[in-house]
Image (spheres, coloured by chain):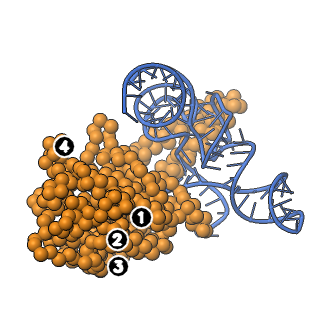
Amino acid sequence: MLQVNFLRQNKEEALKRLAVKHFKQPGLVDEIIALDDERKKLQAEFDNTQAKVNTASKDIGKLMAQGKKEEAEVLKQAVAEHKSALEPLKQQMAATEKKLTDTLIQLPNLPSALVPEGKSPEENEVIREGGIRPQFDTPPLPHWDLAKKYNLIDFELGNKITGSGFPVYMHKGAKLQRSLIQYFLDYNTEAGYTEYLPPFMVNEDSAYGTGQLPDKEGQMYFVTEDKYYLIPTAEVPVTNIYRDSILRAEDLPVKMTAYSPCFRREAGSYGKDVRGLNRLHQFEKVEIIQVVEPEKSYETLDEMVNHVERLVQSLELPYRILKLCGGDMGFASAITYDFEVYSAAQERWLEVSSVSNFENFQANRMRCRYKDAAGKTQLVHTLNGSSLALPRILAAILENHQSADGIKIPKVLQSYFGSHVIE
RNA sequence: GGAGACUUGUCCGAGUGGUUGAAGGAGCACGCCUGGAAAGUGUGUAUACGGGAAACUGUAUCGAGGGUUCGAAUCCCUCAGUCUCCGCCA
């Protein structure tokens, strides 16, 4: 969430940026500042009264020690009066604070100055395109047909065991999946990321910390008995490693990578969007996350984009990188680059990674800070990106690398997969 | 799942109702000492939210939340976690 003091000092700027995100309730900014004023006033009043109670209590202690019981009784009376004033103040303060937080978390992060105007995905800016689209003599098969032909994935079996959106990978399909995970993790750790294997369920505090709660609970599976959420991405457990902590400047940057299955309810999706591997309720993903000093986060963002780009290139897939426009960005992000790979048979682009700088938006929610060189405690910046989401990569590999001789396996995967082709 | 013990600052650890935000030690930072280092020695060393130009200062925080009391790290309740024993188990 945004910081009240920042809004106070940069109100015009904040409103301008919120407009880029097409935020519909700019009035909230004034409301927040007013609530914060109210909060301060109440707290000052509360603190003063509490201070009187505290001093009187100490005096009572001294008087008791001296055996002056009557005087102590008089003071007790006075304390009782102050305390009766304290109770309503306390309630008002709690109510105001809650309202302030509730309002504050409705404000999305401000888009960075680099973010283009625009309302919908069509207005995203293509910043780079790479790789080569394959040419076919006969129309290429979509990945769901290829999956069946080579016995790699059974979608119907998943329906039987669980429900739609839970495919069963098998044989070479399962192995290719495992190879991809292994390769991605190796690629990331070689670049200095520390590997984690986090819990796949998180508590409410963690879901709140990265911004899934309170708004997106409909997107997550929830285990009612234990009040745990199944993670929609490894970003949630991994970023929360540093919730409520103060790092030393020399600990930064923190670079982490993690594989995890991701669970998403995806209510309301239908049609060609969800065909095959395009959109699933459970899928695998390898994530990269960095916690950095504020001054360095944009440098880090470029580094992460380049890192993911080289990874996609190594898979020999046609791809493009988009800079998302204000209207298409996520709630918590200040800037987002999406990676898409071309699906040769479906003739459409599939999103396989989203690299974002959250600046201090998540850090503020999670209270993740560091002591800078001057010894001052301030919020860190957090960034994350997929490297990469598996199903659509798998779909793209199948569709783009299909041939009369079978599915050709990209060179970098061959040692992991143990073969150069699926026949 | 059952029974018991426990949860204090960066760490170890004292503290069972009254100037305790918290003894003592370690660590760390800075200074002195030293040719340099170690040892020694002195000082400092939490976070959040207020007030103040600043020095400084108010409030809260001893696992979390509630309660008793004029006053709680200390007493009571609920929850979470850690450890030990038993049960179950990949």
Is the residue at mark 4 from the same chain as the one at mark 2?
A: yes
Output the letter for the chain in blue. Answer: B
Label 1 Cα neighbours within 10 Å, binned few <14 / some 14-19 / many ≥20: some
Is the residue at mark 1 from the same chain as the one at mark 3?
A: yes
Query: For mark 3, what is the residue?
Result: A114
Query: For mark 2, what is the residue?
Result: A314
Badge 2 amino acid: Ser
Identify the residue shown where x is 48% and y is 49%: A46
| Position above or below: A225 against A266 | above
Identify the residue shown where x is 17% and y is 71%: A344
Output the letter for the chain in orange. Answer: A
A298 lies left or right of A68:
left
| Position above or below: A358 against A49 | below
Alpha carbons under labels 3 and 2: distance apart: 28 Å
Residue A77, label in figure: none
Badge 4 amino acid: Thr
Label 4 Cα neighbours within 10 Å, binned few <14 / some 14-19 / many ≥20: few
Label 2 Cα neighbours within 10 Å, binned few <14 / some 14-19 / many ≥20: some
Residue A162, label in figure: 4
Circle 3 chain: A
